[in-house]
Image (tube, rainbow, N blue to C red):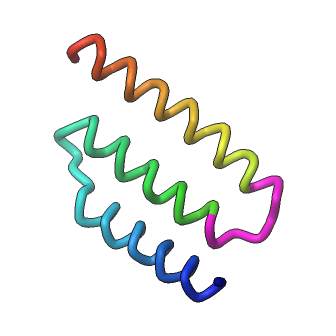
Amino acid sequence: MKLLETILAVACIIIAIYNFDFYNLNRTIVSILLLMQAGMILVPDEKVKKFLRHASVGLAVFLIMKILMGY
């Protein structure tokens, strides 16, 4: 199971790097969310995972609101 999680984290990192775009805020936020997901998979510390979870939920809510508002 650990090997599968590591492969998934590496795939998230590769997709985040490929998808990153300075000029499009939506793509930048999605890339950051993917990197945070990889961090949650790879980091063993529960406090860091909890912080990343809360930060990613906040960022995801911001992205959804931004898309719904039409900006």
Horizontal placement of 12 versus 37: left or right?
Answer: left
Q: Residue 9 or 29: which is nearer the viewer?
A: 9
Q: Position of residue 9 (x, y in %)?
A: 50, 72
Q: Is residue 46 magenta-colored? A: yes
Outermost residue to the top: 69
| Image point (27%, 35%), residue name | 25
Q: Residue 68 or 1: which is nearer the viewer?
A: 1
Horizontal placement of 15 versus 41: left or right?
Answer: left
| Image point (37%, 41%), residue name | 29
Horizontal placement of 42 versus 34: left or right?
Answer: right
Q: Position of residue 62 (x, y in %)?
A: 45, 24
| Quarter of the image that includes the C terminus | top left
Horizontal placement of 29 versus 21: left or right?
Answer: right
State whether residue 5 is above or below residue 33: below
Outermost residue to the front: 1
State whether residue 7 is above or below residue 31: below
Q: Which residue range is magenta in the image?
A: 41-48
Q: Position of residue 38 (x, y in %)?
A: 53, 65
State whether residue 18 is above or below residue 47: below
Outermost residue to the left: 23
Q: Is residue 70 magenta-colored? A: no
| Quarter of the image that includes the N terminus | bottom right
| Image point (82%, 58%), residue name | 46
| Image point (57%, 35%), residue name | 57
Q: Position of residue 35 (x, y in %)?
A: 47, 59
* Dominant secondary structure, magenta: helix
Residue 70 image-quadrant placement: top left
Q: Residue 25 or 41: which is nearer the viewer?
A: 41
Count numbered badges in the picture: 0
State whether residue 37 is above or below residue 14: above
